[in-house]
Amino acid sequence: MTQPANWSALTAVMRRDLMVVMRRRSDILNPLLFILIVVSLFPLAVGPGPDILGRIAAGVIWVAALLSALLGSERLFREDYLDGTLEQLTLQPQPLALLAFGKIAVHWLLSGLPLVILAPVCALLLKLPIAGWSTLLATLLVGTPILSAMTAIGAALTVSLGRGGALLSLLLLPLFIPLLIFASGAVEAALVGTAAWPQVLLLAGLSLLTLLLAPFAVAASIRVSVN
Amino acid sequence: MWRWLHPYAKPETVYHLLGRWLPWVTAGAVLILGGGLVWGLLFAPADYQQGDSYRIIFIHVPSAMFSMSIYVSLAVAAFIGRVWQLKMADWALAAIAPVGAVFTFIALFTGAVWGKPMWGTWWEWDARLTSQLILLFLYIGVLALYYAFSDNRTGAKAAGILAMVGVINIPIIRYSVEWWNTLHQGATLTVFERPPMANSMLFPLLTCILGFALLAAALIFQRMRTEILRQELRRPWVKNVLQVSPTTGEQR
């Protein structure tokens, strides 16, 4: 298969996915609103004092991000599975992993990137000290691709189940724990004034590794599910 | 090599082979593990600092070691099932995962029991404890996925992919005590050096480790045989083994 054909297949998948979601924007907005609501629940629950809120802010934002990733995971493959698009994708001459990468990329563009843009608002709501802002944004920027990639693996594994929601969170949340540890560790380091970049770099490396390997796992999972 | 391996792709052969090994492995596990535990718990000397509570290592260390090795074997089985499409490797997931989950639980539980008098807390969010807890969740996830599908074959394949993805956690657990210098101590036993431990404690520990290995093997063999029977329930040879009449389904 020639290089241009692969490239045009990738862009075709991405353009199609973007178009599908753009025609139903609530799919993007709802997970973001979910994050905002979860974040605003915390001041009500633990009290609005800046000393408590500021310390838990980064963790709360990250946990909300994990949960919203699970929330939006259904739409990754479900409808494509139901209307047969997924089956057509497996029949393409182009490698399925490449097309899976396109789907992951679009998912990140529509859920990860808005999250990074929304994060300052959440940080403001939770009174995160200014010193931690840049680190929080950096961890979200390099960490959300991992969320999208891992979510895609889980969604592809459970797409044929129909009632995969609870199972999906059981599968994915344990795998997100290292991400959560590094991300909140980085922000914590920034808040106490030590260097946060080692943890951010570690996250970035983890992110690249995941993006490299996840498409193959997604492709394998899709083939299992479609059979 | 393939010609030699070929007969072992047949469930019936493997069932009988495991059946032949099982009594030996079980007897070895009972004898060695029983001996090691009695030696460690009753006859080994008490620690000068921790007193008798250090004796938990005779259970904690082997189960923690094998909770990780069993996961690796799970991932290897998943890999074999994925690459060479051997259905027996897929079934091995269902045989291996529960044993690994129980070993992980034993390691966590004994660690908590030891931690209460030593660290003053049942649970600490320490790197190794947390990653071991993730391991338990991974085992449960693999099992949940295995049994979630109405089609057994799909479930096994999906669980296999998850098992392979989860293998990234193993180095994190193994090196957690070195990367994050937290509460849990580093490894005492290493392959290349003589451990800093008195012989009177080391030998019972090594015996217990061998005993736990045999125990894991025995449990996995037995579960594998059951899984083979479960999957092949409609085959004539299974009906023969179970002494079931092929026409009415009643036991003879």
Image: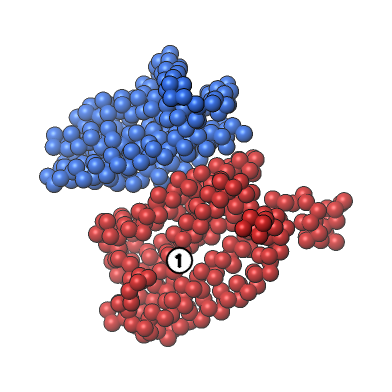
Chain colours: A blue, B red
On the image, the x and y values in percent for residue A98 come to 45, 30
Tell me the residue at 42%/76% (across/down): B205
Q: Where residue B159 sits in the image (x, y, percent)?
A: 54, 45
Say which residue appears at 12% left-offset and 45% top-offset. A193
Quarter of the image for residue B250 reads bottom right
- Name the kind of residue labelled 1 in the image: Ser
Dot 1 alpha-carbon crowd within 10 angstroms: few under 14, some 14 to 19, many 20 or more:
many
- Locate residue A162, reporting x and y percent: 57, 32
Q: Quadrant of residue B128?
A: bottom left
Residue farthest along the top direction in this orientation: A23
Residue B181 to residue A150: above or below: below
Residue assigned mark 1: B63
Residue B134 lies, with reference to residue A113, above or below; the image says below
Give the secondary structure at mark 1. helix
Count of all numbered marks drawn on residues in the image? 1
Vertical relation: A64 (above or below) B47: above
Q: What residue is at 45 percent from the left and 66 percent from the top?
A: B63
Quarter of the image containing the C terminus of chain A?
top right
**Against A108, is B194 above or below?**
below
Asked whether residue B73 is in view, the answer is: yes
User: At 50% across and 34% down in the image, what residue appears?
Assistant: A219
- B98 or A96, nearer to the observer: A96
Q: Going by the image, does B233 lie left or right of A171?
A: right
Horizontally, is B65 left or right of B81 in the view? Answer: left
Q: To which chain does the residue with label 1 belong?
A: B
Q: Position of residue B191 (x, y in %)?
A: 37, 70
Q: Nearer the viewer, residue A71 or B113?
A: A71
- Examine the rendering and report whether any part of residue A164 can be seen: no
Q: Looking at this rendering, what residue extends furthest in the right direction? A: B247
Left or right: A63 as drawn, with respect to A92: left
